[in-house]
Amino acid sequence: MTKRGEAERLISRVLGPAGRELTCEQCFAELDRYAELSLAGADADRQVPGMRAHLEGCPACAEDLGSLLALLNEQQQPG
Amino acid sequence: MRKRSPPAVAKNVMPLATMETPTETPRPCRAVLSHAAVAESRRWLDRLSSTGSERERAVAELRTLLLRAARFELARRPEIGAEREDLAQQSANDALLAVLGKLGEFRGESRFTTWAYKFALLEAGVKARRRAWHGREVPLEDTTGPLLIDARASAHAPAETTDLLAALRDEINGCLSERQRVVLIAVTLNDVPIDVLSERLGSTRGALYKTLHDARRKLRAALAERGFELDLNGWEES
């Protein structure tokens, strides 16, 4: 990470995501559908507008999605 | 005024974001669900909505499934020590109550098991974050200045970045309410998990994120007022 990149990353974290975003409650309501669409290779961001922006701005919800994807992925592993 | 070349910046910087339910949501999208998956979800619902021993068996199976998810989540967190299994059991119990209480909200847009898993993962994740911060002081004081004028960030940053950092620091101190400032600094600058902060402030993740969102919106508007043009690709001072 360059010094310039650090400053910009800091600014991005403070100012948050672009565009319209879901609330945490809406994000949780869509989490399972979004995860399955993602794993199926569908355009989850188009199907669930506002989700991507929220995930960029909310580390906790992004972590929840990461966990769900990891669990589903693990279950798809053979054996 | 001269336009400066926009620096490369993360794509998620844009002014005046709105926090609204997008109206164009195409739904439902069940294309990824097989008939077998739909039928399986239906079976779960029928069994959990039944009575007697069939329901008891279904509830027991559901708890086993939720416990598996909670253990999976906690196993991913090395900071959780001896209390891991206890937290997993608590998480499974809390998730079971949540799932049974919200059966009517299942829309069939994913597998039932995927829908149920998210409750266990949420419970385990929140408990793990709070456990990791147990006994730690949550920094709520104003640390805006030192962090935003952090030597690493400012010493080598181009002039427009330094200008924006300075303006941002001023606006954080100037245009936000005390609550907005506390939440913004804790979550975005001091890396306090929002679930930990919500516990300390007696609030919820959703309410605090709304506060954070409003603070960000105010900052973007204030920076735009100062002439900083923030867009998907960078910023310019006009």
Image: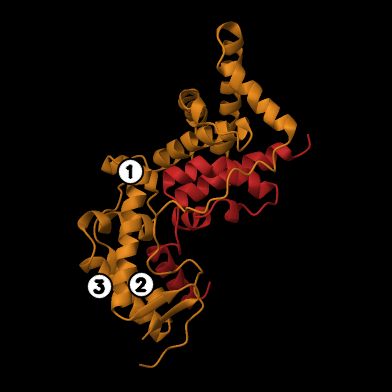
A3 or B167, nearer to the observer:
B167
Q: Are marks 3 and 2 on the same chain?
A: yes
Does B134 sit left or right of B53 as displayed? left
Return the x and y of residue B179 as percentages of the image width and height: 23, 53
- Look at mark 3 in the image and give the residue it sits on: B170
In the image, residue B46 above or below residue B9: above
Splitting the image into 4 quarters, where does residue B199 fall?
Answer: top left
User: Measured from the top left, where is residue B103 in percent x and y?
Assistant: 51, 26
Seen at 50% across and 31% down, the residue is B105
Q: Output the chain of dot 2.
A: B
Quarter of the figure with the N terminus of chain B: bottom left
Q: Which class describes the residues within 10 Å of circle 1: few (<14), some (14-19), or many (20+)?
A: some
Q: Which SS class for mark 2?
A: loop
Circle 2 packing at 10 Å, graded few (<14), some (14-19), many (20+), is few
Residue A56 percent across, percent down from the top left? 49, 58
Looking at the rendered structure, the number of numbered marks drawn on it comes to 3
- Chain ID for orange: B
